[in-house]
Image (cartoon, grey):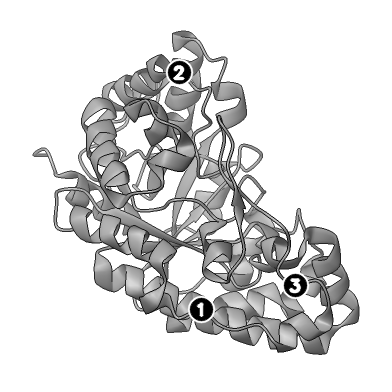
Amino acid sequence: MKNLTSRERVFTALSCREPDRVPFFLALTFYGAKELGMSIKEYFSSSKNVIYAQKKMREKYKHDFYYGFYYASLEIEAFGGDSIFYDDGPPNAGEPIIKNLSDIDNLNIPDVKKSDVLRKVLETQEALKGLDAPVIGVIVSPFSLPIMQMGFDKYIELIYFQRDYFWKLMKKNMEFSTTWANLQLRAGADVIVYFDALLSTEMMPKDILQETGFLIAKEMFKKIEGPVVLHMASAKVFDSVNEIIDPKVAAVSFSKLDDIKKLKEKFKGKVAFVGNLDGISMRKWTYEDVEKNVRDLIIRGASGGGLVISDSHGEIPWYVSEEVLVAISEVVQRYGTYPIKKVI
């Protein structure tokens, strides 16, 4: 097979067919600050920094995507909240913006088109569109957004004991998330990652999810005007995928605890899978560790297409070395060429 562009390679794999080699994605967000030698807060202050770093890091590591994502709590900033910045990790949401039920009543839906903080993301995606690699956009799902809006403990109480207010908040969040996703697609994103850690049955009981998160996801997939990648962070996905599989869902993330072989057997041809390298242990990997983990994943999951190699969480940690990232790239290119050899 002739060598494909990254764009051709990715969309062939997402259609559950074999491209020239297995595509891979290094989820480099705040890592760009390290690349440019500046603080994370300074890095995210300008879209020019992110655009330059995304191009530079793709040239260095030769992976198959541009990541048009900043950080999750940016959405909280759009609602009027704050982010706390760190020297060596992703920004986190500050003080909850919802402290009582009346705050849900009074919560204003951000005007996405007029939001200065969100505009930076759209500028980044617009600058990266139309190149030889697809651009990834991200939304925090309406169902997981309240973890930052009100805190995990209060949100769990809302789900279990205040279902009327839960749905009132969901209605507002769904309106915001729909607009935010579709503006990213119009700006230049090729796919939208629907980031929802709570959708895993490892996080919440399935019966509760069937009444809440699964319903919300299905409705959101109808509203998002492009392909979706469903991402459940590092949580197991096997028991959740069947509940929400949808023609709009091109791929689903999977964790280090999921078996890619079983996933592909169960959902053959229906959806592709993205994962499942462990970013935490990756900090200490040797070249031999990279070779074993990446090669084993290719052998178990690459045949037939439908696999994109990435980390399982959606963000490469600060303390993963450049040498490890270069090694991942080398090993994918060495062992990931189709047809896949079963014994290497």
Q: Which residue is mark 2?
A: 321
Q: Give the residue drawn at x 39%, y 39%.
A: 302
Alpha carbon separation for disc pair 1 and 2? 38 Å
User: Local crowd at mark 1 within 10 Å, few (<14), some, or many (≥20)?
Assistant: many
- Find numbered disc 2 in the image and state the secondary structure of the residue it sits on: loop
- Residue 98 is marked as 3
Q: Is residue 332 above or below residue 77?
A: above
Q: Secondary structure at mark 1?
A: loop
The x and y percentages for residue 198 are: 69, 61
**In which quadrant is the N terminus drawn?**
top left
Q: Report the residue at 78% width, 67% height from top.
A: 206
Q: Nearer the viewer, residue 337 or 206?
A: 206
Q: Are marks 3 and 1 in contact (CB under 8 Å)?
A: no
Q: Earlier in the sequence, mark 3 or mark 2?
A: 3
Q: Amino acid at mark 2?
A: Ser
C-alpha distance separating marks 3 and 2: 38 Å
Kindly identify which residue carries mark 1: 110
Dot 2 surroundings within 10 Å: few (below 14), some, or many (20 or more)?
Answer: some
| Residue 38, quarter of the rendered image | top left
- The disc placed on residue 268 is none
- Residues 218 and 171: in front is 171
Tell me if mark 3 has few (under 14), some (14-19) or many (20+) residues whose alpha carbon lies within 10 angstroms of its own: many
Relative to residue 223, is residue 203 drawn left or right? Answer: right
